[in-house]
Structure formats: structure tokens, C-alpha cells
Image (cartoon, rainbow, N blue to C red):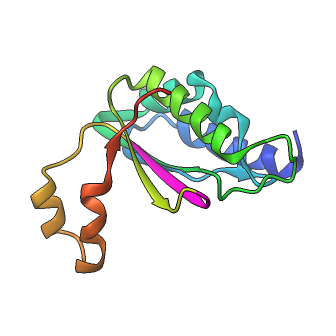
Amino acid sequence: MDGNLTRRWLVLEESISDSLSSKGLMVDLFSKGCLIPELQDPDTWMKMKKKLREGGRIMVNVGGSCVEAEDSRRDGKVIMEETLKAMEKVFPGEVRVLNLGSRKDDSSIAVTGGLPDLDLWKENLPKSLRFYVDMWKPYIVV
């Protein structure tokens, strides 16, 4: 593991090993242009799930084809799918994905848990973000 990856993983380990539970977690962990490999492991998601309060959620930048890894053998779209599959194993039927961008240069965000009341959600968002509420789709394993 390179130094940056080690530091990022240690921060993640510390945050999920804390004795306090959380209502929500945000995950945006990349190294060498890719999502860190631990995010393709269902055990990582299980550790995070155990730290959530009831009804808590995890929101994740899962990248996509827009991610250009330093290692040309690592395809951003494939890594995104592997990460979503790992999440789905731990949160079956509870993973939603928001795809941003075009097919050529996409980026995606995932969230666990059921969606809130969409109308209420829209009311509480700035007008410029309301458009995205209806774009969340259930993740379907490919």
C-alpha cells in the first residue's frame, strides 16, 4: 500500500472503529486515481453499517468512467460496479445511484437506505438542486 492509501485507510478505520454510532457517513476515498480497493470488499461496508444508527445512511462517491487511474489496467467503470456490488451485498435492495454526466464521461454517487419523501426533500433543497431528486435509481446488479 502506498503512503497516501495507508493514511486514507487509517482515517477510515479510525472513523468506523469509533465507539459512537452515526446517522450518516460520507465516503470519498481515492488513491492513484481510483477508489481504494477496500471499498470493493463487502466486509468494509459491513463495518461501516455497524456504525450507523437505525435509519442511518452512507453516501459514496463511486466514481465512474470519468476516473482516470494511474494504472491503465484499472477501469473506473469496472471499479464503480465492483464497489456497488459490494455495497448491495451488505445493503440488499437499499442502494440507490445518481448518475451524473454523459455515458462517455460519467460519474456516480450512491446512497444506502430508502429514499425520503421526494416532495418534502425537494421543498428542503435549493431550487438549483431539486432537479436531481428524481434522478436517483435503485442499483440493479449487472
Q: Give the overall secondary structure of the magenta segment.
A: strand
Depicted 114 relative to depicted 30: above or below: above
Of residues 1 and 137, which is closer to you in this image?
Answer: 137
Please state the extent of the stretch shown in magenta in the rendering: 104-111
**In percent of the image, x 18 and y 48: which residue is there?**
116
**In percent of the image, x 49 and y 33: which residue is there?**
48
129 falls in the magenta region = no
Q: Quadrant of residue 16?
A: top right
105 falls in the magenta region = yes
Percent of width and height locating residue 5: 79, 46
Percent of width and height locating residue 51: 43, 32
Q: How many marks?
A: 0
**In percent of the image, x 32 and y 26: which residue is there?**
93
Depicted 117 relative to depicted 92: above or below: below
Horizontal side of 4 relative to 17 (left or right) equals right
Of residues 113 and 50, which is closer to you in this image?
Answer: 113
Of residues 25 and 83, which is closer to you in this image?
Answer: 83
Percent of width and height locating residue 50: 43, 26
**In percent of the image, x 30 and y 72: which residue is there?**
129
**Quadrant holding the N terminus:** top right
Q: Quadrant of residue 22?
A: top left
